[in-house]
Amino acid sequence: MSRSDVERYLSELSSPLAPALRELCAIVRDTDPRVGEELKWNAPSFFLTGHFATTNLRPRGPLLLVLHAGARKRDVDLRAAVQDPDELLDWKSGDRAILSFSDLESVRTAAPQVRSILEDWIAATQQA
Protein backbone atom coordinates (compact mmCIF):
# COMPACT_ATOMS: atom_id res chain seq x y z
CA MET A 1 0.00 0.00 0.00
CA SER A 2 1.19 3.50 -0.74
CA ARG A 3 0.38 7.16 -0.51
CA SER A 4 -1.88 6.85 -3.56
CA ASP A 5 -3.85 4.20 -1.63
CA VAL A 6 -4.21 6.67 1.25
CA GLU A 7 -5.31 9.42 -1.13
CA ARG A 8 -7.91 7.11 -2.67
CA TYR A 9 -9.10 6.06 0.80
CA LEU A 10 -9.46 9.69 1.89
CA SER A 11 -11.25 10.74 -1.31
CA GLU A 12 -13.76 7.89 -1.01
CA LEU A 13 -14.36 8.23 2.74
CA SER A 14 -17.91 9.14 3.67
CA SER A 15 -17.80 10.31 7.25
CA PRO A 16 -18.59 13.63 8.88
CA LEU A 17 -14.97 13.56 10.12
CA ALA A 18 -13.44 12.96 6.66
CA PRO A 19 -12.36 16.62 6.26
CA ALA A 20 -10.73 16.50 9.70
CA LEU A 21 -8.91 13.27 8.82
CA ARG A 22 -7.65 14.75 5.52
CA GLU A 23 -6.33 17.80 7.38
CA LEU A 24 -4.72 15.69 10.10
CA CYS A 25 -2.97 13.49 7.52
CA ALA A 26 -1.63 16.61 5.80
CA ILE A 27 -0.27 17.91 9.11
CA VAL A 28 1.54 14.63 9.79
CA ARG A 29 2.97 14.47 6.24
CA ASP A 30 4.10 18.10 6.36
CA THR A 31 5.84 17.74 9.73
CA ASP A 32 8.86 15.98 8.26
CA PRO A 33 9.69 15.47 4.56
CA ARG A 34 10.87 11.91 5.31
CA VAL A 35 7.43 10.76 6.47
CA GLY A 36 5.84 8.02 4.40
CA GLU A 37 2.25 6.88 4.64
CA GLU A 38 0.24 3.82 3.83
CA LEU A 39 -2.97 2.11 4.81
CA LYS A 40 -2.20 -0.14 7.75
CA TRP A 41 -4.66 -1.41 10.32
CA ASN A 42 -7.39 -0.17 7.91
CA ALA A 43 -6.38 3.48 8.36
CA PRO A 44 -3.77 5.98 7.24
CA SER A 45 -0.55 5.19 9.07
CA PHE A 46 2.76 7.04 9.04
CA PHE A 47 6.33 5.83 9.16
CA LEU A 48 10.00 6.64 8.78
CA THR A 49 12.03 3.50 9.45
CA GLY A 50 9.08 2.14 11.43
CA HIS A 51 5.50 3.22 12.01
CA PHE A 52 5.07 5.99 14.57
CA ALA A 53 1.48 7.21 14.11
CA THR A 54 -1.82 5.72 13.01
CA THR A 55 -5.18 7.39 12.59
CA ASN A 56 -8.36 5.91 14.00
CA LEU A 57 -11.75 7.01 12.73
CA ARG A 58 -14.60 5.28 14.51
CA PRO A 59 -18.25 5.30 13.44
CA ARG A 60 -19.05 7.24 16.60
CA GLY A 61 -16.68 9.31 18.65
CA PRO A 62 -13.66 11.45 17.95
CA LEU A 63 -10.94 11.18 15.34
CA LEU A 64 -7.80 9.79 16.96
CA LEU A 65 -4.13 10.01 16.10
CA VAL A 66 -2.41 7.18 17.94
CA LEU A 67 1.29 7.86 18.48
CA HIS A 68 3.37 4.76 19.09
CA ALA A 69 6.91 3.45 18.94
CA GLY A 70 6.00 0.65 16.53
CA ALA A 71 3.46 -2.14 16.28
CA ARG A 72 4.68 -3.93 19.39
CA LYS A 73 4.86 -2.52 22.88
CA ARG A 74 8.35 -1.30 23.70
CA ASP A 75 9.94 -0.79 27.06
CA VAL A 76 10.56 2.94 26.65
CA ASP A 77 9.06 6.01 28.24
CA LEU A 78 8.76 8.90 25.83
CA ARG A 79 6.93 11.28 28.17
CA ALA A 80 10.03 13.33 29.04
CA ALA A 81 11.03 13.59 25.36
CA VAL A 82 7.71 14.98 24.12
CA GLN A 83 6.74 18.50 25.11
CA ASP A 84 2.98 18.89 25.54
CA PRO A 85 2.34 22.16 27.40
CA ASP A 86 -1.32 22.20 26.34
CA GLU A 87 -1.82 18.62 27.58
CA LEU A 88 -3.27 17.37 24.31
CA LEU A 89 -1.81 13.89 24.73
CA ASP A 90 -3.61 11.10 26.52
CA TRP A 91 -0.77 8.77 27.53
CA LYS A 92 -1.73 5.09 27.49
CA SER A 93 1.79 3.88 28.30
CA GLY A 94 5.33 5.16 27.97
CA ASP A 95 5.38 4.31 24.26
CA ARG A 96 1.76 5.15 23.35
CA ALA A 97 -0.25 8.37 23.43
CA ILE A 98 -3.40 9.57 21.73
CA LEU A 99 -4.47 12.91 20.27
CA SER A 100 -8.23 13.33 19.94
CA PHE A 101 -10.19 15.65 17.64
CA SER A 102 -13.92 16.32 17.45
CA ASP A 103 -14.03 18.08 14.07
CA LEU A 104 -12.06 19.93 11.40
CA GLU A 105 -11.85 23.10 13.47
CA SER A 106 -10.31 21.25 16.41
CA VAL A 107 -7.62 19.84 14.09
CA ARG A 108 -6.88 23.28 12.65
CA THR A 109 -6.80 24.94 16.08
CA ALA A 110 -4.35 22.36 17.45
CA ALA A 111 -2.18 22.17 14.31
CA PRO A 112 0.84 24.10 15.68
CA GLN A 113 0.88 22.03 18.87
CA VAL A 114 0.38 18.80 16.93
CA ARG A 115 3.34 19.60 14.67
CA SER A 116 5.53 20.28 17.70
CA ILE A 117 4.43 17.05 19.39
CA LEU A 118 5.08 15.11 16.18
CA GLU A 119 8.56 16.61 15.80
CA ASP A 120 9.41 15.51 19.34
CA TRP A 121 7.79 12.11 18.86
CA ILE A 122 9.67 11.44 15.61
CA ALA A 123 12.98 12.47 17.17
CA ALA A 124 12.37 10.29 20.23
CA THR A 125 11.16 7.20 18.41
CA GLN A 126 14.04 7.23 15.95
CA GLN A 127 16.41 6.98 18.93
CA ALA A 128 14.29 4.64 21.07
Image: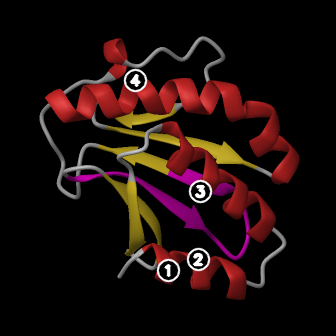
The image quarter in which residue 112 lies: top right
Residue drawn at (68%, 62%), measured in percent from left and top? Answer: 21
> How far separated are the C-alphas under marks 4 and 1?
27 Å
Three-letter amino acid code at the position of disc 3: Cys
Is residue 53 on the magenta stretch? Answer: yes
Q: Confirm or deny contact between disc 3 and disc 1 (CB under 8 A).
A: no
Residue type highlighted by circle 4: Asp
User: Which image quadrant: the N terminus?
Assistant: bottom left
Say whether residue 128 is visible.
no
- Identify the residue position indicated by label 3 in the image: 25
C-alpha span from label 2 to label 4: 26 Å
Q: Earlier along the polypeptide chain: callout 3 or callout 4? A: 3
Q: Amino acid at mark 1?
A: Ser
Q: Tell me the number on the disc at residue 120.
A: 4
Q: Of marks 3 and 1, which one's residue comes earlier in the chain?
A: 1
Tell me the kind of residue under disc 2.
Glu
Query: Badge 3: few (under 14), some or many (20 or more) residues near its Cα, within 10 Å?
Result: many
Q: Which residue is mark 1?
A: 4
Q: Are marks 2 and 1 in contact (CB under 8 Å)?
A: yes
Q: Secondary structure at mark 3?
A: helix
Q: Nearer the viewer, residue 27 or 20?
A: 27
Which residue matches tag 2?
7
Residue in the image at 55% along x and 64% along y:
56
Q: Which residues are magenta?
A: 50-65
Q: CA distance from mark 3 to mark 1?
A: 13 Å
Observer able to see residue 51: yes
Q: Earlier in the sequence, mark 3 or mark 2?
A: 2
Q: Residue 110, image x and y in percent?
A: 73, 32
Q: Mark 4 or mark 2, which is nearer the start of the sequence? A: 2
- Which mark's residue is nearer the viewer, 4 or 1? 1
